[in-house]
Image (tube, rainbow, N blue to C red):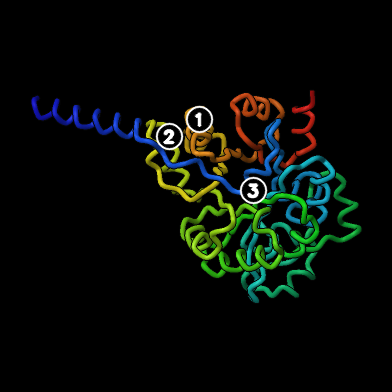
Amino acid sequence: MRNFLILIAIIALAWTGAALWPGPAPVSHPWLEARVETRAERIAHAGGLGRAPANTLEALAQAVEDGADVLEIDTQMTADGVLVLMHDDTVDRTTNGSGRVDALTLEQITRLDAAFGYEGEDPDRFMRQGVRVPTLAEALAAHPDMRWIAEIKPDTHEAAKAMCDTIREAGMGERVMVGSFHDSAMGHFREICPEVATGMASNEALSFYIAARLGLANWHPTRAHALQIPPRASGLDVAHPRLIKAAHARGLAVQVWTINDPEDMAALLELGVDGIITDRVDVMAQVQAP
């Protein structure tokens, strides 16, 4: 019994010390400093899926027209080392082609129809006009004044380096935030491209969530500038007020994906999230309208 009480006392002291420990200075970056200050930001998921075929120049243009503050895109790498806008690791679902992206050259991929299978608004128009898969460089060049969240889909150092090189060549180091589910790819990207803002990878976000729920977020090491999280995962209330408070204390932006229902948007806005990643920027704009 005596040993148990000693253990409890040690745990209590450790928790108190951690809770009172002065945290690191809040993170800062030009990407964060350029945020809209008067409301949560409208982040166009995959360039605006639902209004145009996802991850295409057409979707990006529609999202900008609808009032997006940030364009969120997914990237895969071709066999010849070029990053293209694509969610899946194969072209089967979103084009009229077949095969892994990393087994196809850029020339082969750009010949495909990226409107194939699209079931959003006005699908006949996109099928008639034809839509192709763009490169990351083309997308950035099309909207140089926008801010971006670009995801590294492959868990490879080569994809991380290609992302860094493309952002630098475009002169967009202050306008692109890079995310990835993969801790390895994210770690490599941060090493070679330290000037670019990043979101937390999966394990990093999970550990921050646990630390925040325990009141120990000040002790959590991170080089990230934001958390992109779902509202719930594995039965957990991820977008929890304690997480949001802990993130804001560290200067981190909290962006929740993928939210299309107006009532869900309103609930998250009430919680004080910094951005909502949505297929329907136009709907979010209506929710936020005075």
Tell me where residue 164 sits by quadrant: bottom right
User: What residue does disc 1 label?
Assistant: 245
User: What residue does disc 2 label?
Assistant: 212
> Does 212 sit left or right of 52 as displayed?
left
Measure the C-alpha gap from mark 3 to mark 2. Answer: 24 Å
Near-viewer residue (215 or 88): 215
Residue 67 vertical position relative to residue 96 in the rendered view, above or below: above
Residue 219 in the image: x percent, y percent? 37, 40
The reply to whether callout 3 and callout 2 are in contact (CB within 8 Å) is no
Residue type for callout 1: Lys
Earlier residue among tags 3 and 1: 3
Tell me the quarter of the image containing the C terminus: top right
> Does 1 sit left or right of 135 as displayed?
left
Residue 117 vertical position relative to residue 51 in the rendered view, above or below: below
Residue type for callout 2: Ala
Between label 3 and label 2, give the one nearer the viewer.
Answer: 3
> Does 195 sit left or right of 282 as displayed?
left
Measure the C-alpha gap from mark 1 to mark 2. Answer: 8 Å
Local crowd at mark 3 within 10 Å, few (<14), some, or many (≥20)? some
Residue at the location (39% across, 31% down)? 215
Residue at the location (47% across, 44% down)? 205
User: What residue does disc 3 label?
Assistant: 31
Local crowd at mark 1 within 10 Å, few (<14), some, or many (≥20)? some
Report helix, strand or loop for mark 3.
Answer: helix
Residue 96 in the image: x percent, y percent? 76, 63
Residue 114 in the image: x percent, y percent? 78, 60
Tell me the quarter of the image containing the N terminus: top left
Earlier residue among tags 3 and 2: 3
* Numbered circle sitting on residue 94: none
Report helix, strand or loop for mark 2.
Answer: helix
Residue at the location (74% across, 42% down)? 69
